[in-house]
Image: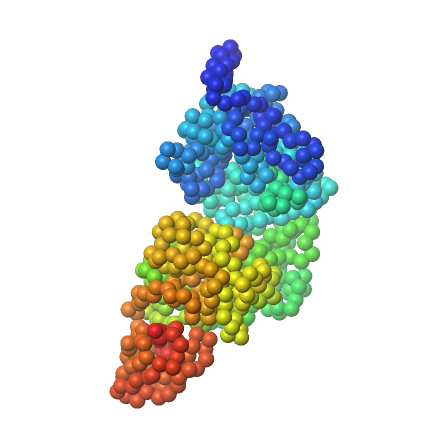
């Protein structure tokens, strides 16, 4: 013991000349009057300090992915004040972020931070900072942490959920702030809701007997699902192994670290309030639970009219037996879930836990909704999909019957309140027309949409093998459906050309129409190729020149308010921005070389700029929908000069369907468009589908005079008795 104390004294004496020592309780303390005034900031905010604490959470259990830290892992751990032998108490806990900025201005992990164990006594020199109202210490150098010795493993304090949050999960800082970053235990709480997010992550809400609610989150390995790949290089596992609870599960004890994600009066914070983060499997002590429904499958996922899809799942009860299982289903879109047809789901012959049911066939285009309900011998019920405790109507799963197989529409169409895909986390295969590509003079990302376009028809494709495709090509894509911070996308495993090609038509949206946007009205256009245009053909203006983060806005009026404008973003490519580097119009010249190097000369937008329309991909991120123009050509009829360069074209032929070929050239053209080949009828349309030229092409050569047309893109449809095909034509 004397040796350890001597080490501490030496360490404190060595560091004292550089930084002042403060106990954790001093750094964390906030006065009652400040908390009552909704101010929970440390009095040492922004200062570099030195403190000593006992490690609570082992360093190999933290699981926080980060694209900005070398190695992809941002380690966090918690320490507790040395007072009271490391027992949790008021203002005694502190969260520590174990990364620092090196001489090359790179974020790297602290040496040996992943190998900390509970009970390690450490000295830490760091900057006091705040993230979403949670106080943290940030490392300042590679030598910020010194291990001084060991102490007994810290123990939790037993507190009530009501000390942290109310029944709406709103934080109560006057009684909760003292427990921020502390190791605590709740007793006798019930799971009300299980929340799947990010495709492979889970959190859940629990309430106490008084109805006070807290979210149980997954900062540590203990709550990572088997589908999650661990990022901590020292993790004892390569994947997670957590089995999520069922709504209605009753925990006699639930332990973990309290973090703060401010809400309520902390208007700048998040939405969870105080949250709990267990870090060991022993922290979840179940008293009883409803039946557990797992390994659910629907085969096929998208049936044809003559297929009867099989529903298969495993149902177990950990504290008794399964008493009954039923399927509820309907093809009537007007019925509430409690009105669905009820049928018994039978136990598979020879099995003790596998259940199966075949849904009836339905006509092409029919939306089928269904859910499962299982009850145990104690009368406890569970549902698939999971349904929060106390919710009046059960949640349901759904699909649309398709003669020709899955469409992008089926992946995107969402009846869920959070907008999530019904195929979230599942592997799917779908065809689509490329609307944006990674080729030069294009967006830099692959998007596809259904051949006919329209609502719910577009999707972002990320992953392997996506760089070889051009706009207008039809591709067959296989991948996993995921929600990327609210944006549905396909994580591609395989993609190939079908040999077909088609000119996609944009969905026309009014950028000034507030009514269409309210209540997530534009969710149906996420990932789609769209055209912002005034319905009365009036000019659009750059209404707001710089809304931050590279966004400007267009509207009918300069200075338009939030709901009466639409965001546009270009010139940025990073892990938070996905715009084109081939679009000149940006909010700031610094984007020429920041967040990707632009391939065209940037032009700062001004409110003197106007245009007929803006085309691009509708993207969702950071709680906003924005249009991503793919190149300068997507600004139609703009009143400034922009560089134009021919977009690389696919060599894949258009679908002929038995039509003898008709050559179309030159394309682009200034005035004359030549048709050469077999007899056919031609129709030239603008991108709103309006006919501008129509006639018959006789075998041989025919010249179309386009001199009277405005510059821009048009669709040329060639029709023959045996079929039809469409070309995109550019008028200079």
In this view, the residue farthest toward the right is 210
Q: Identify the image quadrant of residue 110.
A: top left
| Residue 163: percent from left, percent from top | 69, 36
Name the residue: 49% across, 48% down.
200
Looking at the rendered image, the quarter that the C terminus falls into is bottom left
Q: How many marks?
A: 0
Relative side of 353 to 381, left or right = left
Residue 82, image quadrant: top right
Q: Position of residue 258 (x, y in %)?
A: 60, 35
Where residue 221 appears, x then y in whole percent?
Answer: 50, 38
Q: Out of 641 and 182, give the one closest to the viewer.
A: 641
**Quarter of image, res 106:** top left
Can residue 454 be seen from the camera position used here? no
Residue 209 vertical position relative to residue 667 in the rendered view, above or below: above
Query: Seen in the image, is 579 located left or right of residue 187?
Result: left
Given residues 565 and 661, the one toward you in this image is 565
Residue visible at 49% across and 32% down in the picture: 138
């Amino acid at each position: 013991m004397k040796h350890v104390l001597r080490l501490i004294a030496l360490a404190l004496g060595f560091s004292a000349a550089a930084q002042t020592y403060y106990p954790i309780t001093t750094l964390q303390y906030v006065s009652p009057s400040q908390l009552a005034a909704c101010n929970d900031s440390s009095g040492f905010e922004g200062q570099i300090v030195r403190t000593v604490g006992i490690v609570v959470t082992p360093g190999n259990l933290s699981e926080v992915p980060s694209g900005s830290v070398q190695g992809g892992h941002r380690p966090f751990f918690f320490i507790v004040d040395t007072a009271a032998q490391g027992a949790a108490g008021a203002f005694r806990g502190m969260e520590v972020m174990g990364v620092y900025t090196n001489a090359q201005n790179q974020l790297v992990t602290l040496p040996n931070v992943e190998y900390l164990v509970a009970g390690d006594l450490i000295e830490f020199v760091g900057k006091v900072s705040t993230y979403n109202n949670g106080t943290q210490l940030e490392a300042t150098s590679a030598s910020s942490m010194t291990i001084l010795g060991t102490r007994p493993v810290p123990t939790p304090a037993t507190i009530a959920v009501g000390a942290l949050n109310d029944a709406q999960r709103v934080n109560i800082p006057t009684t909760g702030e003292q427990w921020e970053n502390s190791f605590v235990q709740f007793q006798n709480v019930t799971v009300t809701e299980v929340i799947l997010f990010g495709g492979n992550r889970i959190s859940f809400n629990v309430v106490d007997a008084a109805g006070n609610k807290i979210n149980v989150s997954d900062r540590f390995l203990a709550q990572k699902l088997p589908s999650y790949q661990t990022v901590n290089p020292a993790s004892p596992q390569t994947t997670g192994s957590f089995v999520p609870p069922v709504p209605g599960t009753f925990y006699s004890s639930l332990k973990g670290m309290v973090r703060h994600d401010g809400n309520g009066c902390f208007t700048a914070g998040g939405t969870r309030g105080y949250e709990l983060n267990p870090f060991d499997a022993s922290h979840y002590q179940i008293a009883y639970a409803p039946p557990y429904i797992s390994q659910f499958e629907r085969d096929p996922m998208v049936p044809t009219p003559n297929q009867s899809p099989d529903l298969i799942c495993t149902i177990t009860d950990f504290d008794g037996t399964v008493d009954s299982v039923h399927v509820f289903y309907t093809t009537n879109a007007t019925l509430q879930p409690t009105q669905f047809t009820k049928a018994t789901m039978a136990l598979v012959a020879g099995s003790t836990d596998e259940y199966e049911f075949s849904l009836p066939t339905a006509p092409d285009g029919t939306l089928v909704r269904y859910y499962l309900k299982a009850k145990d011998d104690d009368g406890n019920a569970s549902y698939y999909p999971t349904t929060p405790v106390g919710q009046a109507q059960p949640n349901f799963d759904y699909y649309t019957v398709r003669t020709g197989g899955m469409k992008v529409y089926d992946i995107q169409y969402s009846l869920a309140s959070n907008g999530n895909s019904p195929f979230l986390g599942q592997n799917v295969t779908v065809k689509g027309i490329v609307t944006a590509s990674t080729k030069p003079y294009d967006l830099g990302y692959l998007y596809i949409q259904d051949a006919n376009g329209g609502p719910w028809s577009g999707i972002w494709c990320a992953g392997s093998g996506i760089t070889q495709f051009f706009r207008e090509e039809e591709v067959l894509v296989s991948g996993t459906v995921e929600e990327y911070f609210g944006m549905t996308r396909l994580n591609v495993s395989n993609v190939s050309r079908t040999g077909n090609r088609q000119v996609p038509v944009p969905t026309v949206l009014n950028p000034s129409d507030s009514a269409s946007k309210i209540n997530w009205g534009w969710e149906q256009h996420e990932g789609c190729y769209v055209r912002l245009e005034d319905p009365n053909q009036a000019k659009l203006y750059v209404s707001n020149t710089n809304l931050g983060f590279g966004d400007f806005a267009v509207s009918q009026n300069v200075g338009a308010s939030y709901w009466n404008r639409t965001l546009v973003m270009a010139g940025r490519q990073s892990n938070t921005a996905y715009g084109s580097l081939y679009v000149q119009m940006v909010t700031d010249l610094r984007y020429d070389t920041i967040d990707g190097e632009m391939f065209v000369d940037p032009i700062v937008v001004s409110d003197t700029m106007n245009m007929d329309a803006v085309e691009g991909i509708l993207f969702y991120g950071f709680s906003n929908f924005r249009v991503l123009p793919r190149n300068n050509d997507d600004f139609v009829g703009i009143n400034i000069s922009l560089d134009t360069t021919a977009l690389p074209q696919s060599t894949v032929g258009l679908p002929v369907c038995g039509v003898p070929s008709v050559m179309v050239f030159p394309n682009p053209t200034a005035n004359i468009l030549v048709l050469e080949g077999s007899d056919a009828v031609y129709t030239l349309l603008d991108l709103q589908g309006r006919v501008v030229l129509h006639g018959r092409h006789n075998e041989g050569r025919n010249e179309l005079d386009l001199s009277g047309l405005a510059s821009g893109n048009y669709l040329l449809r060639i029709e023959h008795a045996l079929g039809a095909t469409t070309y995109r034509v550019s008028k200079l």
